Amino acid sequence: MAAQGSPILSKPRNFVLPLAMDGAQQRNRDNLTDDLPISTPQTEGMIPVNKDGDRLDTVIPKPTPEEWSIYNQRVKQQKPCNNFYMRNQCPIPNCTLDHTPLEPEALHVLTCILKGYPCPRKGGCRSADCYNGHICQKNGCYGKGCRLNYYMHSMDPNVADWVMPTSLPGTDDSSEESPTESLEEIMSSVGGAPV
């Protein structure tokens, strides 16, 4: 038993942190990505939801230092257009962002960065091509300094069902604008390698 006033140095595996907002409890997030769904050919085009009907994101592997290096070199030349690379179209006439072919490694990093920005529709999103986050995918993250809200850290990550999207690719305009933080801020928020 810890002495009164002394810090607890480790959490038991089944540690649950209570949240005051709505009585929900926060789950142990040390190995969250082990519980997130993995996309398969059978689930292609479908959206994973948990028992509460909240949208989940399929797990995206953390970018390697080499992928970050390729991405950083690319962004230093010109910032990529999120809509163009994530939705295969850009609705902005005379867009000044990059629309040239993107290396697969840079695309992987961009995908991870965008999942760190909350979807404005939150768990109710059923858009086929939403590229924002619906659940925080950072192992060990409990929300401090994270862009995703408290609920996106406490929701059940287990898939109860795979549902069809209600909006078709290219018809959703709910995603936020392109991030404008420095590369250092972006990389620290998604656990990336230092520049």
Image: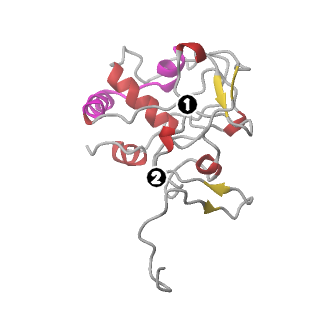
Of 71 and 95, the residue lying toward us: 71
In the rendered structure, which amino acid carries the disc numbered 2? Gly
In the image, residue 47 lies at what x, y percent? Answer: 64, 24
* Quadrant in the rendering for residue 61: top left
Assign the C terminus to one quadrant of the image. top left
Q: Secondary structure at mark 1?
A: loop
Q: Secondary structure at mark 2?
A: loop
Dot 2 crowding, Cα within 10 Å, few <14, some 14–19, many 20+: some
- Disc assigned to residue 37: 1
Of 67 and 37, the residue lying toward us: 37
The residue under the point 60% across, 40% down is: 157
The vertical placement of 195 against 43, above or below, is below
- Disc assigned to residue 140: 2
In the image, residue 106 lies at what x, y percent? Answer: 35, 26
How did the renderer colour the structure?
A: secondary structure
In the rendered structure, which amino acid carries the disc numbered 1? Pro
Residue 23 seen from this side: yes
* Quadrant in the rendering for residue 9: bottom left
- Disc assigned to residue 61: none
Magenta span: 66-89
Specify the farthest residue to the front: 1
In the image, residue 180 lies at what x, y percent? Answer: 45, 40
The vertical placement of 64 against 88, above or below, is below
